[in-house]
Image (cartoon, rainbow, N blue to C red):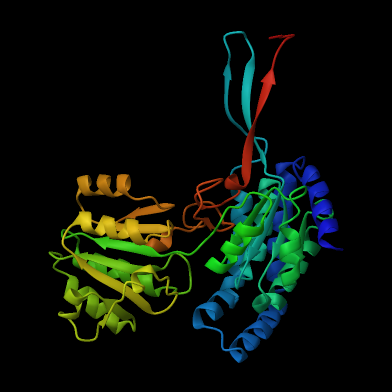
Amino acid sequence: MNMTEIGKKTKEASLKLQALTEQQRVLALTMISQEIIKNKIIIRDQNQIDLEEAQANKLSPAIIDRLTLSDKAIDNLAQMCLDVAAQPQVVGMIDREYTRPNGLQIKVQRIPLGVVAMIFESRPNVVVDGIALAIKSGNGIILKGGKEAAHSNRCLYEICKQAVSHVLPDGSFHLVETREDVNDLLKLDQYIDLVVPRGGSALVKHVKENARMPVVAHDKGLCHMYVHSDADIESTVRMILNAKTQRIGVCNSLESVLLHQNFKGIPQVIEALLEAGVEIRGDKNSQKLNASIKLATDEDYHTEYLDMIISLKIVESETTAIKHIQEHSSHHTESLITNDPKLIELFLNSLDSSCLAINASTRFNDGGELGLGAELGISTSKLHAYGPMGAREMTTTRFLVYGNGHIR
């Protein structure tokens, strides 16, 4: 099929998806979960082909990390489907209702967007995440993954397709695989209701410039953590290491840390990062404390490293820290470490990012960790969603008006 035929078929299927019962959605997700476990060896074999090609092409460690499907990752994909299935029903639910003075009954009902196109890089797990959330939210979905994960993407797609062949309408989801398909896809506004680019800035920019339909961008995560003077040293070190080193190649990993000049744990933070193998690029004040710190450039404070590198700055006040974050933020995730309620309020009222964490690692800006079951991605746009997009964020609302012969 060409892209127009795929768009048309997915649109037709989406109209049927909305009418499915919640029991049918749960059944479909359960069957996908079971098939993923049943085909674990096949998934690993196909993923290994992608990994060998990635290593031969000398792709970065961050990309290889995102590309890898370990046994645990495959088990997590299967569990994710069950977690999404267990989420509260979304489609058809009434958000609010009220009666007008003239007796009209008004209900606001949650409905699917229709057809979502998802263009992503590196992460084969997104195939299953996207399909699972589309099923739960009643949407059709068209997926376009990166060539570096082609074997893994195709394998997971075929497993999902086979699992639901007797439950969902034919054409409920599709996988397209060539770069040429992207530009054709972005022209299909008569069939596609929303496009979600999830990847590097170049991909997001291209989609924004060429899409004829609305775009919800899932752009880079230049995540900050500001540590105030009253922060507990041991807890702060633990949170910084978790945010930076637990998984370096993800968008909610910490890229820049700001330390108040009166924070007594500055040497411990620096030493812990260096011992963990993190390269620190800091300002002149931090260099005076440790000769291993490289001098940061202005560009460093604008960089999402996705690597064992972090930018560091010692600041004279919370106002300076907030101003720095405002200037360099990618509107993804910012974290504040303090016990001061007034500073917490200032932080919340001064910053504009999809997730603000108080005394917690930036790694919690994640659909699963926030109780959504999974995520289509983390939106750095404000329309139609901001932050992790779960099933609810893949729906909209309409008004239902009940009268009894009413006329205006």
Residue occupying the point 45% across, 64% down: 221
* Quarter of the figure with the C terminus: top right
Residue 189, compared with residue 209, is above or below; it is above
Who is closer to the viewer here, 165 or 186?
186
Query: Which percent across, then down, holds residue 277?
Result: 34, 84
Q: Is residue 188 visible?
A: yes
Residue occupying the point 17% across, 74% down: 285
Query: Which percent across, then down, holds residue 65?
Result: 53, 78
Residue 381, compared with residue 395, is above or below; it is below
Query: Which percent across, then down, holds residue 250?
Result: 48, 69
Instruction: Judge from the rendering whether residue 171 lies leftward or rightward of residue 112; answer left or right.
Output: right
Who is closer to the viewer here, 23 or 260?
260
How many numbered circles does the render carry?
0
Q: Quadrant of residue 316?
A: bottom left
Q: Residue furthest bottom?
A: 56
Instruction: Judge from the rendering whether residue 69 lies leftward or rightward of residue 278; answer left or right.
Output: right
